[in-house]
Amino acid sequence: MDLEIGTMAPGFDLPTDGGGRFRLSEQRGKKVVIYFYPKDDTSGCTKEAQEFTALAAEFAKSGVTVVGISPDNVKSHDKFRAKYDLAITLASDEDTAVAGAYGVWVEKSMYGRKYMGIERSTFLVDADGKIAQIWSKVKVPGHAAAVLAAAG
């Protein structure tokens, strides 16, 4: 399913680090940044999480909730968050159903080998639950700042 700006963001309810749950439906009335990343504790994903963490107070001040989603399990998220002192919520999409609903679970290719994986992407959801902006094939440096500028 290809999502477009102005369409309703697919709802989801996922387990998070720290034993919590993240339900998109509970975020109505707030802007939400949903960023999909391939894997905990890898170089690009770590840098992205650190950039969102560095701006976490500014996102909060703007009334914006940030959640990172990957196929890693909650235990992996807990370790990742603790290792880098991350200040953002990490949700576990182990069956990749949410990634599929957002169109970011895609066929990738590396060294001639094809496999399924997350295409690094970010979605800004407005207070009404509609997609306000989409960043596809994200390049990490400066991305969190660009998202904050759009969300603020």
Image (tube, rainbow, N blue to C red):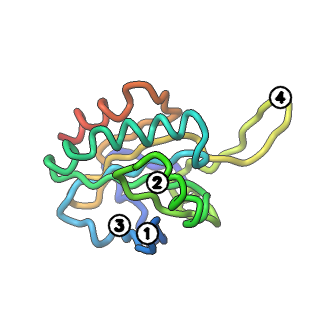
Of pointers 3 and 2, the one earlier in the residue sequence = 3
Quick one: quadrant of the C terminus? top left
The kind of residue tagged 2 is Arg
> Secondary structure beneath disc 3?
helix
Of pointers 3 and 4, the one earlier in the residue sequence = 3
- Circle nearer the viewer, 3 or 2: 2
Residue bearing mark 4: 111
> Secondary structure beneath disc 1?
helix
Q: Which residue is found at the position 43% from the left and 25% from the top?
A: 141
**CA distance for labels 2 and 1:** 9 Å
**CA distance for labels 2 and 4:** 30 Å
**CA distance for labels 3 and 4:** 37 Å
The kind of residue tagged 4 is Tyr
The kind of residue tagged 3 is Leu
**CA distance for labels 4 and 1:** 36 Å
The kind of residue tagged 1 is Gly
Of pointers 1 and 3, the one earlier in the residue sequence = 1
Residue bearing mark 1: 18
> Secondary structure beneath disc 2?
helix
Residue bearing mark 3: 24
- Circle nearer the viewer, 4 or 1: 1
* Label 2 with label 1: CB-CB less than 8 Å: yes
**CA distance for labels 1 and 3:** 18 Å
- Circle nearer the viewer, 2 or 4: 2
